[in-house]
């Protein structure tokens, strides 16, 4: 169920069609650059589904949300401020076919519950208590349920969202109880959602169809929609294969059609991509500021750290890397095995590490101080997970659309950094 393999060069001169050096000169480093065309292409690949619901937690800059909206996708929110982001980007609350904003989470904090009621945001409940809390505020309303099917899978144990080791969703054996809760609160369950993990594989994703169909028969004829969730695999390594979307859709479409036939009403089919839309669009450009040997090991030290891209230290995540020579030339063909690290006062500030913190080398072109390192596939769970550790400012972000670089987030200043701090 796969198509072509992906190639990642280790020497580049451009990202999103624009020269790396000019982007760095204009906007500084570290710098996130997003290619709008890639996001639009990924949305287009999923248009067989009735709704493409972007999981904005992957990359929630307002300009990215606006881009997603302009290309016909809707959005998922997992917090009060993600709801506010969606509204600020032009999405509207209230029901719809499909609803433009959905709130999916395992709890209501008090602010979020007030917000979903105020803006009539549909709710996808991931815990039984949410049903009661929502029912108290919106008796007679409609909800969907996120079900944990009892199994999960992901590229890391930390991204596995199914099974009894995960906090996410309503345990599949509690579905009957949740339907009773909904009935007591005069709520109608109109949809089901399942998501087993981020970066999983097609074998495990396919198993969700059977689990969804089983749960749907418990809910019965009130069902109007099912969501395949997210987790579509994205290639990060040389030679990895792309997922065949058409074949995946066919699996879910067959499930949806059987349910529609059984209950005699249409069933809409949603998909909830996050990483799939955003990852390949983004690059993190950093400048090499030091090159040194530690024993027999060579280190390239750059001005971006895990404060900018936390995935390697969190998950041991692999990202493709390439060198861009500062003079724009091709340099020599000589390569070296280098460990790539950042500027933070933290031993874990290494981009070339595996899960568990094991440091590895990467074969890259021989570079000099002042050259650029480009970290690819950094559009998902990159900027959104940034921190101010070591009092480092958030990086600037640029969206390239129609060959034009648009600054969509200014680099954080010192005044921005200390805003809100008070010496009593």
Image (tube, rainbow, N blue to C red):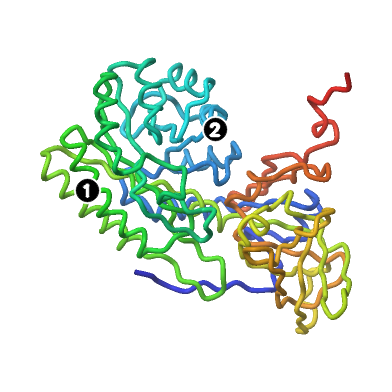
Location of the C terminus by quadrant is top right
**Do the residues bearing badges 2 and 1 touch, measured as CB atoms within 8 Å?**
no
In this rendering, would 100 be left or right of 327?
left
Marks 2 and 1, Cα distance to the nearest angstrom? 32 Å
Query: Residue shown at 39%/56% (left/top)?
Result: 45
Q: Is residue 131 left or right of residue 325?
A: left
Q: Which mark is residue 7?
A: none
Report which residue position mark 1 lands on.
Answer: 214
Q: Dot 2: what SS?
A: helix
Please tell me which of labels 2 and 1 falls first in the chain. 2
Comparing 115 with 47, the one in front is: 115
Residue 88 to residue 7: above or below: above
Dot 1: what SS?
helix
> From what the image shows, is residue 234 above or below residue 255?
below
Q: Residue at x 27, y 32 (%)?
A: 177
Q: Give the residue drawn at x 42%, y 33%.
A: 102
| Residue 12 location (% of width, % of height) | 69, 69
- Residue 92: where, in percent of width, then height? 45, 26
Viewer-nearest residue: 120 or 197: 197
Quarter location, residue 291: bottom right
Pick the residue in front: 53 or 201.
201
Q: Nearer the observer, disc 2 or disc 1?
A: 1
Q: Position of residue 296 (x, y in %)?
A: 84, 80
Dot 2 alpha-carbon crowd within 10 angstroms: few under 14, some 14 to 19, many 20 or more:
some
Report which quarter residue 319 is drawn in: bottom right
Mark sitting on residue 82:
2
């Amino acid at each position: 169920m796969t198509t072509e393999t992906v190639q990642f060069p280790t020497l580049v001169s451009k990202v999103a069609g624009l020269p790396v050096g000019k982007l760095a000169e204009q906007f500084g480093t570290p710098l996130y650059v997003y290619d709008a065309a890639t996001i639009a292409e990924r949305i287009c690949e999923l248009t067989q589904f009735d709704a493409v619901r972007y999981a904005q937690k992957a990359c929630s800059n307002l300009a990215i949300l606006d881009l997603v909206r302009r290309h016909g996708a809707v959005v998922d929110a997992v917090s009060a401020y993600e709801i506010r982001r969606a509204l600020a980007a032009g999405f509207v609350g209230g029901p719809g076919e499909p609803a433009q904003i959905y709130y999916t989470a395992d709890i209501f904090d008090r602010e979020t519950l007030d917000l979903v009621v105020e803006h009539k945001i549909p709710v996808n409940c991931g815990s039984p208590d949410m049903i009661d809390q929502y029912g108290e505020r919106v008796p007679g309303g409609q909800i969907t349920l996120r079900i944990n099917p009892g199994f999960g899978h992901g590229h890391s144990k930390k991204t596995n969202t199914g099974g009894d080791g995960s906090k996410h969703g309503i345990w599949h054996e509690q579905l009957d109880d949740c339907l009773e809760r909904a009935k007591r609160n005069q709520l109608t369950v109109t949809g089901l959602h399942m998501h087993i993990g981020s970066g999983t594989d097609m074998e495990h994703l396919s198993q969700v169809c059977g689990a969804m169909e089983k749960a749907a028969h418990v809910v019965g004829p009130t069902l109007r929609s099912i969501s395949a969730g997210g987790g579509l695999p994205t290639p990060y390594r040389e030679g990895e294969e792309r997922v065949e979307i058409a074949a995946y859709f066919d699996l879910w479409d067959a499930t949806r059609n059987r349910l529609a036939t059984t209950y005699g009403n249409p069933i809409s089919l949603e998909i909830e991509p996050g990483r799939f839309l955003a990852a390949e669009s983004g690059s993190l450009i950093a400048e090499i500021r030091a090159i040194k040997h530690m024993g027999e090991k060579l280190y390239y030290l750059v001005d971006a750290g895990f404060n900018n891209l936390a995935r390697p230290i969190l998950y041991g995540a692999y990202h493709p890397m390439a060198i861009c020579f500062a003079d724009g030339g091709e340099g020599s063909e000589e390569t070296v095995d280098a460990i790539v690290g950042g500027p933070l006062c933290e031993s874990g500030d290494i981009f070339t590490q595996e899960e568990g913190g094991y440091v590895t080398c990467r074969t890259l072109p021989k570079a000099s101080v002042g050259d650029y390192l480009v970290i690819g596939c950094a559009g998902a769970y990159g900027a959104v997970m940034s921190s101010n550790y070591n009092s480092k400012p958030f990086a600037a972000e640029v969206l390239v659309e129609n060959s034009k670089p648009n600054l969509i987030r200014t680099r954080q200043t010192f005044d921005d950094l200390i805003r809100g701090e008070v010496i009593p």
